[in-house]
Image (tube, rainbow, N blue to C red):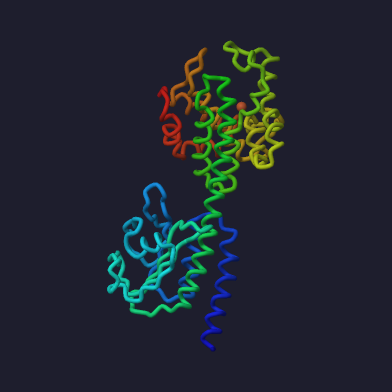
Amino acid sequence: MASEMLTKYKEITLLYDIVEKISSCLDTKEVARLVIEEARRVIKLSSVSVLLLNKETETLELIGEFGHDQEQPTVSWGVGIAGSVLSSGRAEIVNDVHSDPRFVEGVVTICSLMCAPLKAKDTVVGVIKLGSDQPVTYTAEDLKLFTTLASLAAVAIENAGLYEQLKEAFYTTVYTLAETIEKRDPYTGNHTKRVMEYSLAIGKNLGLSEQDMARLQLGAVLHDIGKIGVRDSVLLKESSLNDEEFEQIKKHAVYGEEIISRIASLQSAIPGVKHHHEKFNGRGYPDGLKGEEIDITARIIAVADSFDAMTTNRPYRQGLSLDEAFEELRKYSGSQFDPEIVDAFFAADVMEAFFAANSRQKIIL
Ligand SMILES: [Fe+2]
């Protein structure tokens, strides 16, 4: 009776802890890590693996593990005990693995194991397997606890997967929107992508937080979205602009802000969009902000955008060589550009970003 009570208590505290920890977790690997941590706390084991099914290759891919020094081989559908649990969808205890004909010797010593399916809405999306390097007798209670843990993990992993899909759909929509605008001016081809790659390389070098990196990415993709409000005769003009036309072009920064401020999920990109033409010395537009009054994302996009504009060919002028563009950035560091951002530009792997963004098109070096 006392041991039954203890098991129940363990089960309840496990449920409480795990639900609290993983329900807000939106990253599959982090879910796997938390589940492994909980399993280690309540079940006797020396190794655990969390494996997710790759539907295309029909193999199980490792997303988290404990107790394995070497890489584990991939598991195919129906092969081994994990593969068998994946096909049957039923959790199993195998207290003496060597007497089980399905057992495939792995990279760690295992005498006893438990394996449970990760089931989300009746679909098996993977398995979680734990083992002991000493012979132990796993009980039905152990299996129940383990299965409960696997069910919670499956729901959290599915949620994290859905969140990833949603995020991807969101970014795809934003890119498509930006590309649609870019298509109006065919000579800018891939400008958005390059500005994004340069900006992210600079942001990474500056050690920006994940949150700042996300708004930097959005701001870089959408920086010129306001050009949709500028007349073709001005936007596409091949000769130099008169004062009135230049005033028209300048409005794209505020138009951009107006467009994205109506979309809740794009709010964080506003500073980058509105202020990417501000200058460090306060002589830019639209607000004449200076120094750190200009949001960090806007200061980064300003460098990335200018570098790309300088190195891109236009119908009426040849782009600068890389060395000439580098020279221009150095020359205007401290006046037009934030010197710290220019330093980060040179320290960052901008060349890698340059080749990544230009890999599908002809470039001038
Ligand atoms: Fe712009």
Please tell me which residue lies in front, 285 or 335: 285
Question: Is residue 171 shown above or below 67?
Answer: above
Q: Is residue 141 left or right of residue 242?
A: left
Residue at figure coordinates x 53%, y 57% from the top left: 121
For ligand 1, which image quadrant applies?
Answer: top right
Q: Is residue 12 left or right of residue 274?
A: left
Q: In the rendering, at what x and y percent does residue 212 appear?
A: 59, 45
Q: Is residue 240 above or below residue 217?
A: above
**Left or right for 42, reference 236:** left
Residue extending furthest toward the top: 239
| Residue shown at 39% from the left, 55% from the top | 61
User: Residue at 42% across / 22% down in the picture?
Assistant: 364
Image-quadrant location for residue 363: top left
In the rendering, at what x and y percent does residue 149 appear? 51, 68
Judge whether 112 appears above or below 344 on screen.
below
Q: Quadrant of residue 80?
A: bottom left
In what quadrant of the picture does the C terminus appear? top left
- Residue projecting furthest to the bottom: 1
Q: Residue 188: horizontal and vertical position, in percent?
A: 53, 22
Give the total number of marks visible in the rendering.
0
Residue 110 rendering spot, x and y as whole percentages: 32, 71
Image quadrant in which the N terminus is located: bottom right
Residue at 42 percent of width and 28 percent of height? 360
